[in-house]
Amino acid sequence: MKAIQAGLLNFLKKSPQFVIPIYQRNYSWTATQCRQLWDDLLRAGRNENIKAHFIGAIVYVEGHGNVVQQEPLVVIDGQQRLTTSTLLIAALAKHFELMNIGSLLDTFSAKKLRNYYLLNPDEDGERHFKLILSETDKETLLAILQDTFTPTEASHRISENYVLFQELIKLHQNELEAICQGIAKLM
């Protein structure tokens, strides 16, 4: 095994897809954990002396790539952090769309957030999405990413935390640049 230090956004952008295997537990972060991440991001984004915020390791197994397309990365550890980051980025992209915000910091626009970190715009089917969760959480996350109706058997944690991030973004609209800077510092 080798460890590579990478910023989360670059890692998401360069990776073809993350798949959470069926044997991994369901998404379980609570509002408390999401609020802690939010507070950490605000602190990092407000403070120029903080160069990076370590969110934790993401351990994965690379598939056997072929000439035509890269294989998905199977996540062994880091699912909770990866899913929470995806929910936050999705909520931020939605806010940018609703508020008609062009871009912040040259990297943050609704289109870039979606096409770099949430989706694979040139792919179809499940390959279109950067993150595929296990069956219990999968349909709820895909509904959020496609901006469609939440499934009847929705994953409550996924839905609740997405709504929480939407509320926090709305509450802190005047600090969107700090949040974006905090996200950019995630390692």
Image: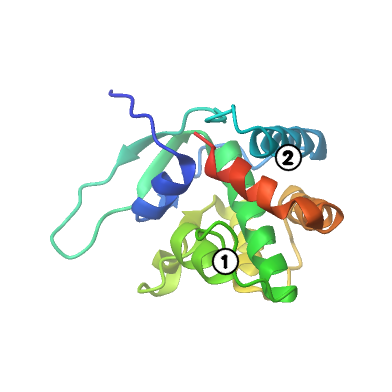
The answer to whether 46 is drawn above or below residue 90 in the figure is: above
Residue drawn at the location 28% of the way across and 24% of the way down: 2
Residue drawn at the location 16% of the way across and 57% of the way down: 66
Q: Residue furthest left?
A: 67
Q: What amino acid type should be assigned to the residue bearing mark 1?
A: Ser
Q: Is residue 175 left or right of residue 2?
A: right
The answer to whether 173 is drawn above or below residue 22 in the figure is: below
Give the residue at mark 1.
109
The answer to whether 148 is drawn above or below residue 81 in the figure is: below
Residues packed near mark 1 inside 10 Å, few (<14), some (14 to 19) or many (20 plus):
many
Q: Which of 9 and 163 lies nearest the eye of the viewer?
A: 9
Give the residue at mark 2.
38
- The answer to whether one can see residue 32 in this image is yes
Q: Position of residue 163 (x, y in %)?
A: 80, 57
Residue drawn at the location 71% of the way across and 33% of the way down: 43
Q: What amino acid type should be assigned to the residue bearing mark 2?
A: Trp
